[in-house]
Image: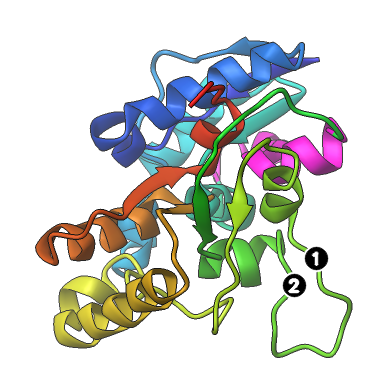
Amino acid sequence: MKVALFVPCYVDQFYPKAAIATLELLEKLGVEVHYPKNQTCCGQPMANSGYEHLTTGCNNLFIDNFIGYDYIVCPSGSCTLHIKEHLHSPEQEEKAVDIRKRVYELTEFLVDVLKVDNLKARFPYKVGLHNSCHGLRGLRISQMSELVAPAFSKPAQLLDMVEGLELVPLSRNDDCCGFGGTFCVVEEAVSSKMGIDRVDDHIEHGAQYITSADLSCLMHLEGILRRQKSDVKVIHVAEILNHYSNE
């Protein structure tokens, strides 16, 4: 299969190791990965701020870069969901529809498309899994606790394959971290309190690392951890699944 790697702008600028880990992991699993070099922001920040009508340029550029691939894989739930639900183009709507059907968040691609059942990975630490709202309630990569339905978690399913990793239980598995894109700007105090509560849940249960399929959430939580001078670190799920250590 021919797969295009979609790297969100904030991942490129702040967490490039997560993008590199995604590339390496996919290649280890036998995937032919391409990186369209002219890709840039998907337009989500503008759309979240109420300016979706100004995202036409971003949409058309995205289509030009990603049309023609079997799949498009992204290490970010929020950006994946934005493309999946909001990619439109008056000039190229047929292509936009085709791309919306082919874009996948990394863990859903590994579970649903590649059907990975074994990983050569080792990460001997206690890890807390943060379920982002976009991944949970948008992409449905995990089950929402408010539903009376069988539980599942695609990120947890993959993390369970990692040697030495202990996935710690949390008191509230799917609370929002408070980031919410522009929410953390316009509701700073509420956002900060939600993030602190989320961090406290992980710390109370002994997590050494907090992981997620959404680096935007991890960026928010990392800011809180740094201000608390905590030893707990954040790490994208791809970095764990691609990690092998003899420690």
Residue 57 screen position, x and y as percent? 37, 38
Inspect the magenta stretch and tell me whether residue 111 lies in it: yes
Distance in Å between CA atoms under marks 2 and 1? 5 Å
Location of residue 14 (image quadrant): top left
- Judging by the rendered image, the residue that carries numbered circle 2 is 143
Q: Is residue 77 visible?
A: yes
Q: Residue at x 24, y 85 (%)?
A: 193
* Amino acid type at mark 2: Gln
Are the residues at dot 2 and dot 1 in contact (C-beta closer than 8 Å)?
Answer: yes
For residue 135, above or below residue 57: below
**Circle 1 residues within 10 Å: few <14, some 14–19, many ≥20:** few
Question: Which residue sits furthest front?
Answer: 247
In the rendered image, which quarter is residue 168 located in?
A: bottom right
Indicate the position of residue 130 as horizontal and vertical percent values. Answer: 51, 64
Instruction: Please name the amino acid that badge 1 sits on.
Output: Phe
The verdict on residue 79 being magenta is: no
Badge 2 local density, few (<14 within 10 Å), some, or many (20+)? some
Mark 1 secondary-structure assignment: loop
Q: Main secondary structure of the magenta part?
A: helix
Relative horizontal placement of residue 88, taking residue 49 as reference (left or right): right
Question: Would you identify the image quadrant in which residue 140 lies?
Answer: bottom right
Q: In the displayed structure, would residue 30 be above or below residue 139?
A: above
Which residues, given as a range, are shown in magenta?
89-116
Q: In the image shown, does 15 or 203 lie closer to the viewer? A: 203
Residue 74 as seen in the image, left or right of residue 12: right
Q: Please state if 9 lies on the left or on the right of 190 as rendered.
A: right
Name the residue at 35% across, 30% down.
40
Split into 4 quadrants, where in the image is the N terminus?
Answer: top right
Judging by the rendered image, the residue that carries numbered circle 1 is: 152
